[in-house]
């Protein structure tokens, strides 16, 4: 059923294949002998299980600063992780995005070189200060000849670059998808021709570019979390978990409600791919940027939490309001996201007999080590009362009575319910309510 969903997006910078109307067959359906030589020779190394079990929690420089980055800005974010309580809440990664390098590799060693004007102590100098704060350091590269901003890419240099990053103490790599040579892409017009011979997009040119970096990272002494950023191309959700720890589902995020509903719709049909070490990435957070209402910010955070997307803050942390900090450090929501015993996300469910279907769905249920949870989004533009039947929530015991615990406030609601009960709540426009169902 998932494979029958046709998903087509055309990116300005690149036209890649997106639709796979045929159900993938198993890799063994055709003999390996029918692979092209590139497919036959591509590494099949698995990503490290020493990192990336849970969706990443951190910060990334791009949404706040684009290319205008330097050591001071990156270290300011790291220090704010401490001073604002973000580290205590579980945030770990300080990730540098594009534009950190010099335009040319070192002529002798062919290594990438940090821009000395932006990073006078190199990336290793920043990494050691970040590590001294008990945090982790992320870097950015690209599975093409150049990054999106035109700095050196890692295609064809995977081993050298992985070794360089490891030597600097890097813990996380975001790997982008710009400037891909024609013979390495999976274009729409070539869709039929470049469809992998066995129907498994793991053997597409796109996946192989990423697999080369997986193998290079695995050869390093230190585990490096691998964040695939190919914008939802080549059915990445089908192979992302065999190649990296997370994968972007779309082109870049935007600080508005239409992005949030768009990424919901893209993500929801593909939640069965999400589990430990395997996360659909809904892109970096926009809280602090643009004109999202408080309710929309709560939904933005709650959705990334209950769908188990990486959460990488993307703003100048010093400008966050007290209200925004309270949203992104909510203990109970973060505990759901970082639950070490349940890897699956919340899934849409039919909240009561005859409930209307909406796109994106408004009702989700999921499990954590604490029990069953219900999340309700109001996707429309005004306040309304919504309801769910306890009998419709998957996984509740067949008898007994229940209390509802509000994850936002940390308080129990007053009523007591049974499986025969229906619960009603007024939800503000674009807001999300979040409950744990406790045994009474
Ligand atoms: C693309 O061309 C380069 C240069 O000839 C070659 O090294 C590479 O293997 C080719 N990639 C594919 C997928 O054929
Ligand atoms: C949302 O933001 C994106 C990127 O800035 C923009 O292209 C799009 O038009 C915006 N949508 C709305 C409804 O404002
Ligand atoms: C949100 O409000 C809209 C419009 O009033 C309504 O149609 C929708 O059902 C509401 N959703 C929830 C979850 O309350």
Image (cartoon, rainbow, N blue to C red):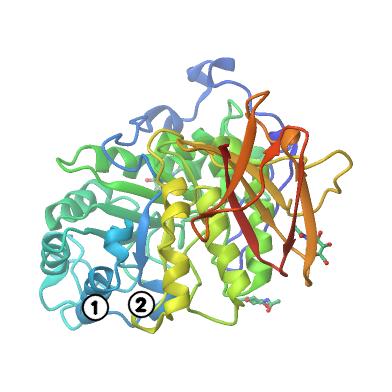
Left or right, residue 261 beside residue 35: right
Please indicate whether residue 314 sits to the left or right of residue 379 in the image: left
CB of residue at label 1: within 8 Å of ligand 2? Answer: no
What is the distance, in whole Å, between disc 2 and disc 1 at their CAs?
A: 9 Å
- Residue 228 is situated, as x and y percent measured from the top left of the image, at 43, 50
- Residue 188 location in percent, x, y? 66, 51
Q: Specify the label residue 317 is tagged with.
A: 2
- Asked if marks 2 and 1 touch (Cβ < 8 Å), the reply is yes
Residue 76 - label: 1
Asked which secondary structure carries label 1, the reply is: helix
Residue at x-position 18% and y-position 60%: 110
Residue at left offset 25%, top offset 38%: 218
Q: Residue at x 57, y 75 (%)?
A: 255
**From the image, which quarter does the N terminus lie in?**
top right
| Front position in the image: 49 or 349 | 349
Would residue 194 be seen by someone viewing this image from the given angle?
no
Quadrant (top left/top right/bottom left/bottom right) for the C terminus = top right
- Identify which residue, 298 or 174, lies in the foreground: 298
Q: Nearer the viewer, residue 276 or 140?
A: 276
In the picture, measured across the screen, residue 353 lies left or right of residue 280, that is right
Mark with earlier residue (2, 1): 1
């Amino acid at each position: 059923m998932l494979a029958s969903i046709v998903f087509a997006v055309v990116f300005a910078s690149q036209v890649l294949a997106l639709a796979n109307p045929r159900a993938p067959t198993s890799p063994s359906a055709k003999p390996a002998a029918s692979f092209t030589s590139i497919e036959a020779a591509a590494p099949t190394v698995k990503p490290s299980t020493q990192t990336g079990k849970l969706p990443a929690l951190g910060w990334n420089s791009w949404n706040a600063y684009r290319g205008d980055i330097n050591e001071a800005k990156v270290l300011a974010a790291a220090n704010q992780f401490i001073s604002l309580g973000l580290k205590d809440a579980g945030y770990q990664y300080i990730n540098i995005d594009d534009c950190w390098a010099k335009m040319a590799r070192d002529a002798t060693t062919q290594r990438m070189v940090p821009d000395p004007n932006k990073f006078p102590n190199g990336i290793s100098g920043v990494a050691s200060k970040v590590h001294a704060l008990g945090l982790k350091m992320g870097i950015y590269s690209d599975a093409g000849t150049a990054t999106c901003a035109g700095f050196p890419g890692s295609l064809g240099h995977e081993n050298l670059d992985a070794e360089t990053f490891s030597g600097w103490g890097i813990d996380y790599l975001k790997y982008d998808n710009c400037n891909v040579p024609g013979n390495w892409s999976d274009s729409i017009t070539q869709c039929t021709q470049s469809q992998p011979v066995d129907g498994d997009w793991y053997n597409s040119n796109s996946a192989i570019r990423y697999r080369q970096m997986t193998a290079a990272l695995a050869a390093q002494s230190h585990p490096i979390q691998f964040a695939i950023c190919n914008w939802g191309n080549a059915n990445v959700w089908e192979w992302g978990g065999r190649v990296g720890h997370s994968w972007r589902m779309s082109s870049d995020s935007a600080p508005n409600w239409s992005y949030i509903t768009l990424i919901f719709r893209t993500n929801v049909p593909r939640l069965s791919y999400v589990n430990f070490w395997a996360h659909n990435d809904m892109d970096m957070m926009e809280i602090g940027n643009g004109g999202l209402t408080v309710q929309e910010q709560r939904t933005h955070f709650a959705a990334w939490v209950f769908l188990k997307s990486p959460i990488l803050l993307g703003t100048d942390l010093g400008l966050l309001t007290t209200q925004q900090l309270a949203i992104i450090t909510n203990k109970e929501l973060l505990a759901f996201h970082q639950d070490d015993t349940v890897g699956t996300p919340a899934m849409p469910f039919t909240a009561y007999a005859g409930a209307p279907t909406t796109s994106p769905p408004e009702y989700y249920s999921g499990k954590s080590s604490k029990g069953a949870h219900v999340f309700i989004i109001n996707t429309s533009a005004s306040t309304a009362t919504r309801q769910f039947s306890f009998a419709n929530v998957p996984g509740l015991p067949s008898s007994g009575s229940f209390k509802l615990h509000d994850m936002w406030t940390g308080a129990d609601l007053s009523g007591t319910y049974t499986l025969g009960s229906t619960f009603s709540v007024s939800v503000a426009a674009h807001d999300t309510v979040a409950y744990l169902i406790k045994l009474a």
